[in-house]
Image (spheres, rainbow, N blue to C red):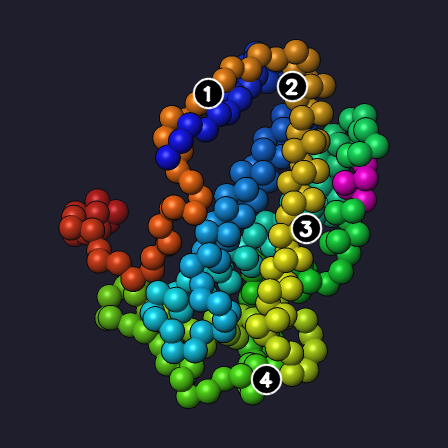
Amino acid sequence: MKPFGLKKIKLSLPTFWAMSDERRSALLLLGLFLNDANWLMKLLVKAGRSLPPEPVPRSNTPEEDANYSLVMLIMTTLVGKIWEGWDLISGKKSKGKKLRSTLDGLVMPSHVKSLEAKLKQELSGDLFVRIRCNVSFHYSEKLIDLSKLKSKITEQDSFFYGTGNIGDTLFPLSTLAGLEPVLDPKPNVDPETALGEVIDEIIGVVGLYCGFVSEVLTLLVQDEFGHFVSEGVTISDAPEFETEPMIHFFVHPPSNLEEIRNSLA
């Protein structure tokens, strides 16, 4: 644990409400894009650090199998979020026209235009849309297959976990099935190599995306609020990333579980 410094930037609330509906929406959307991408990126890295060296589970511990599933979930959700955000930013569909119109009204420096161009180029391939449409925000309408990984699957992989309690069922074979649209569409692909390459590519695109959105958000804030006030905020006991515990799937339920269920009912 050690201190962690932040800047808290104060925005004038009267100015915020005086913004046009389109510009206020753009401000909030850009912030939401960053919130989602930054959280998911931190969770992806944290979950990935809990995996064994070999990405495909081979009779590993239940928590290792669960963390592999978690990595897949976070990775594919992150891809879906980036794709949907870019859909609005690029204005390719009618739902993104208003946001794009707001962005076009900003004077973007050359380095911001360069970031956008690089991001557009990276997202012009089929990786993100393939993941998004098959295993992220949409489940594929096609039959789910494991043919690409057939040579890698053994009897040791054909099982699932369960306790009889809601929330504890885990099916590692389905995690492997989710790899099909993620991996490069080649026959007999080596998943251990391909998945690492895919994650590296995704992380690179996320960096471009967050960099571009941050720059545009800053431009919009400066354009609307002009000079703004910031103050230093210090978190006195922020933990080191490496010291944070792994995320667990198989945990004992809370002692007041019945009370929680009754309150939800």
Q: Which residue is mark 1?
A: 233
Q: Amino acid at mark 1?
A: Val
Under mark 2, the amino acid is: Met
Q: Is residue 203 at least partly visible in the picture?
A: yes
Q: In the rendered structure, which segment of residues is drawn in magenta?
A: 113-117
Query: How far from the left and from the top, in percent, is residue 141?
Result: 59, 72
Q: Which dot, 2 or 3, sits closer to the camera?
A: 3
Q: Secondary structure at mark 2?
A: loop
Q: Earlier in the sequence, mark 2 or mark 1?
A: 2
Amino acid marked by disc 3 = Val
Work out which residue is located at the far right of the displayed protein and give it. 110
Q: Sort mark 3 into few (<14), some (14-19) or many (20+) by Cα contacts within 10 Å.
A: many
The kind of secondary structure the magenta stretch mainly shows is helix
Q: Which mark is residue 115?
A: none
Kindly state the secondary structure of the residue where label 3 is placed. helix
| CB under 8 Å between discs 4 and 1 | no
Q: Which residue is mark 2?
A: 19
Circle 1 residues within 10 Å: few <14, some 14–19, many ≥20 = few
The x and y percentages for residue 137 are 56, 58
Q: Are marks 3 and 1 in contact (CB under 8 Å)?
A: no
For marks 2 and 4, give the one nearer the viewer. 4
- Residue 113 image position (x, y, % from top left): 81, 36
In the rendered image, which residue does mark 3 sit on? 205
**Residue at 35 percent of width and 50 percent of height:** 245
